[in-house]
Image (cartoon, rainbow, N blue to C red):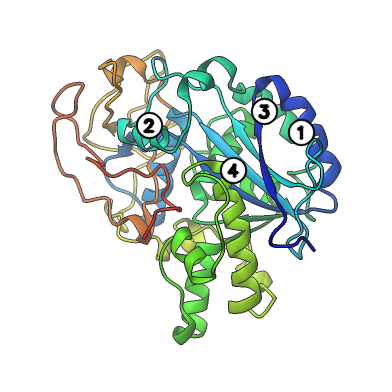
Amino acid sequence: GASPDDPVEIREVWDHNLDEEIKYISHIVEKHNYVAMDTEFPGIVARPVGSFRDTSDYQYQTLRCNVDLLKLIQLGLTFATSAGELPFSPTTPATRCCWQFNFKFSLTEDIYAQDSIDLLTTAGIHFAKLETAGIPIERFGAAMVTSGVVLLEDVHWVTFHACYDFAYLLKALTAAQLPALEIDFFEWVKMFFPRLVDMKHLMTVLEARTPKDALYGGLNTLADHFAVKRIGAVHQAGSDSLLTLGVFLAMRDHAFHGHIDESCLGVLYGLGEGAGNGGGAGGGGGAAAARNNNGGSTFSGGLGLSGSTPLGGNNLSVTNSNSNGTAISSLLKPPPDPVAPDLGADTGPLGGSADTSAAFGGGVHSMLSSDTLTMQKNETQ
């Protein structure tokens, strides 16, 4: 295996070198078939308002509306063997590597939460370069589908609190909005990522099995616990994916004695089977949602958004603080149904239906005033 002291290069992928980097990834993935993944996205700007079947339905609908409305900013992928050996860099001798994909994103045209952009700017992400040299997400999705990284049973995906990560990846891979129903979303997940593990879910499994050995906190807290050293900048996807791999290997080998049970695979913390662990997001727990002709939930209240595509009777409560002050109703192209994200135990509850005046006009419900979900799984604690 790789020595802990081996230098590691985080390879920056832009539009101009996407094809050659994907080609090399296709070459190494057969041997290095453990893929640790992390994303950076522009925060949370919307949530559904009304009644939902249960907490999991609310969590998925929150995720769905935000992922449908927003664009991915970065993706980090770290490939390794089951023993943790990283591939060698194709250009730098005697150096291991992982990848950081930088996507096309415009601060003047795209929707975002201002505090998320502030956090990522502080972390060193250059938005001006993303706008001019970033990878078009459609081109990335097409390249990934034929790369040998997705749709295969022998590729193991390693993540931490990853429902949003997989949702953004699925949007890129399918070039489509997310399914209206959570059950269909998990069919997509199973198809594209047949073997995945979410360490946040593993933590709940460990706590249930052996409470005395329970682990708590976010990714950085676990890294400190297992003495896993970070390489690169926090809140950048390449570095975070590399840290995710290191923490997983330590958790597997020490907390799970070298073996993760099959029953632990395929569960995303905060959704589906993992919804009971997602924290107090609220949203009308257990109430049956009405159905509309589009097969989605009918939500009452909130802000009706203008746009060329009707909401099909659904309403969305929206908050946004784009620096240019443009009214969000003129920016949004609404999805067939709204949706909202899982905050999880790490970031705390949604805070109910606190009514505040947003920067672009009063009368909307603000979901998050100052906190951000951009790095919901990598918070420092």
| Sequence-first tag of 3 and 2 | 2
Q: Is residue 73 above or below residue 16?
A: below
Give the image location of residue 281, x and y in percent: 31, 54
User: SS at mark 2?
Assistant: helix
Mark 3 vs mark 2: give the one in front. Answer: 2
Rounded to the nearest angstrom, the CA distance separating label 1 from label 4 is 15 Å
* Mark 4 vs mark 3, CA separation in Å: 16 Å
**Which residue is labeled 2 in the image?**
117
**Kind of residue sitting beneath label 4:** Gly
Q: CA distance from mark 2 to mark 1?
A: 27 Å
- Label 4 neighbour load within 10 Å: few <14, some 14-19, many 20+: many
For residue 249, above or below residue 49? below
Chain-order first, disc 4 or disc 3: 3
Sooner in the amino-acid sequence: mark 4 or mark 2:
2
Mark 3 / mark 1, whichever is N-terminal: 1
Residue 140 numbered mark, or none: 3
Q: Name the residue type under label 1.
A: Ile
Decide if residue 236 is on the left or right side of residue 119.
Answer: right
Residue behind mark 1: 22
